Image (spheres, rainbow, N blue to C red):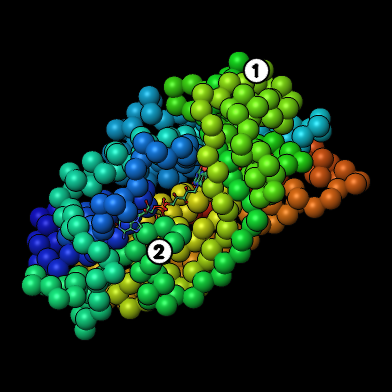
Amino acid sequence: MESLKAEKISRSATGPIAIVGDGPVGLLTACLVARHHPVCRIGERRMTALPEKDPRLYALSATSLNLLERLGIYSELGPLRCRIFSELEIWIHRHRSRLRFSAEDIGGGLLGATVWARDLLPILESFAQAADITRLEDHPDRIERTGGGWRFKEDGRDGEFPLLIVAEGGDSRLRERQGIPLDIHDYGENAVTGRCVPEREGGDVLRQVFTPWGPLGLLPAPGGGLSFVWSMPNPIARAWQLRKPEEWALLIEEATEGFYGRIHLPEPPHAFPLRRLVARRYVAERFALVGDAAHVIHPFAGQGLNLGFLDAGVLAGRLARTVRHSGPVPWAVALEAYDRKRRGANLRFLAGLEALRLFFRVRDPLGWRDQALRVLARHRLLRRPWVAAAAGHGSRSQLRDGNP
Ligand SMILES: Cc1cc2nc3c(=O)[nH]c(=O)nc-3n(C[C@H](O)[C@H](O)[C@H](O)COP(=O)(O)OP(=O)(O)OC[C@H]3O[C@@H](n4cnc5c(N)ncnc54)[C@H](O)[C@@H]3O)c2cc1C
């Protein structure tokens, strides 16, 4: 421990690692990296997320919860702000078969927990503050490359940042300036999300109904009630956007076929335009992308933030190695290893997700989709890989490998 501290201090001679982006992934990355390196968060206050305005309820996988717990964040959230779920149920609108994926299918435990963005962000922020991380309010556009890293233009301050980690989200400007090539696809859809209070709670089960208007996810919320995420084509979202909360409630009652009884929406829902974005590289010289800055995926499976948290965990693990090995592992080696591991895993995940999305979208006059659900419902062995993916188990080995 002492030698780790000494290394951390000696590395401060080269300057702290700079992290830009105050979203959940940037904050978690800062907390994890700060265990081994000095860290400086850079950003403008006006760009900082306003958590109280964020309507999202995140479904975090068991692996994400483990990662948060390495810092004690999951315990800090506690049962009042986290609602555990251990089952996932899906069905197709107006079809009889129901498919249940349960943590029991993979030997028990939990699949994950839900937490409001407005609860998660302030806790991450308070952990970042307690972790002795400097916060520099400056415009990231003023950062420029130097021989040994990065520094602010026309700046009187000494020292430079040996590494720049960018967690600015999907519209990252630093990613653009760095010239990282992107693959972008506009889904032509919006995800409409909001809070609802059902007559019947439905237990600690996450549900997904594939409706003719698009997939509708229903997440049990901490303290009771539900959050819904309904992905729908833009023309429908536009036609429905002016509807009153009580009209939305009726639409959800119809889409869920009365499963939750009468539904009440306390406020109008929010819409998020949807696109897929894939950075063709996650790293450049002394530069790394994490979270939505590197990949934006469709939210119907509720996995975007989970992938971002894994990026944070793997990158922090790789950077920790630069301290732990007797001779420092060069930054480039750590960054290349991060890029190889996370980009490959995220691409595989995305391919699976897109296949699943297509499976529920294509026309199905012969009803083989319902048949497939029935087969899965009967065979636990066939369900296992899906349950393991939902819990994030596939990526656990990446986190063990060289992690702090
Ligand atoms: C409706 C919906 C539901 C979702 N549900 C889930 C779910 O259940 N589970 C899940 O895993 N994922 C979910 N996602 C995906 C998840 O929201 C994203 O993957 C996640 O927010 C990405 O986090 P991030 O920190 O990388 O980026 P962001 O959340 O976009 O955060 C980046 C932040 O950095 C700030 N920023 C940018 N530039 C600067 C700067 N220069 N200075 C300071 N700050 C800056 C931005 O303002 C932003 O607040 C959902 C998405 C949607 C749209």
Image-quadrant location for residue 37:
bottom left
Crowding at dot 2, Cα within 10 Å, few <14 / some 14-19 / many 20+, comes out as some
The kind of residue on which mark 2 rests is Ser
- Local SS, label 1: loop
Q: Quadrant of the C terminus?
A: bottom left
Residue that protrudes farthest toward the front in the picture: 242
| Residue 289 in the image: above or below residue 236 | below
Q: Nearer the viewer, residue 75 or 393?
A: 75
Crowding at dot 1, Cα within 10 Å, few <14 / some 14-19 / many 20+, comes out as some
Q: Could you tell me residue 286's position as x and y percent?
A: 30, 75
Q: Could you tell me residue 69's position as x and y percent?
A: 33, 40
| Residue sitting at x 46%, y 49% | 305
Residue that protrudes farthest toward the right in the picture: 366
**Residue 123 horizontal side relative to residue 250, left or right:** left
Residue that protrudes farthest toward the top in the picture: 199
Does residue 264 appear anywhere in the picture? yes
The kind of residue on which mark 1 rests is Arg
| Residue sitting at x 29%, y 43% | 124
**Residue 159 horizontal side relative to residue 123, left or right:** left
| Mark 1 lies on residue | 262
Q: Nearer the viewer, residue 255 or 47?
A: 47
| Residue sitting at x 61%, y 36% | 242
| Mark 2 lies on residue | 172
Q: Could you tell me residue 311's position as x and y percent?
A: 41, 58
| Residue 272 in the image: above or below residue 56 | below
Q: Could you tell me residue 324's position as x and y percent?
A: 22, 64
Q: Earlier in the sequence, mark 1 or mark 2?
A: 2
| Residue 272 in the image: above or below residue 139 | above
In the image, the residue with mark 2 has its CB under 8 Å from the nearest atom of ligand 1: yes
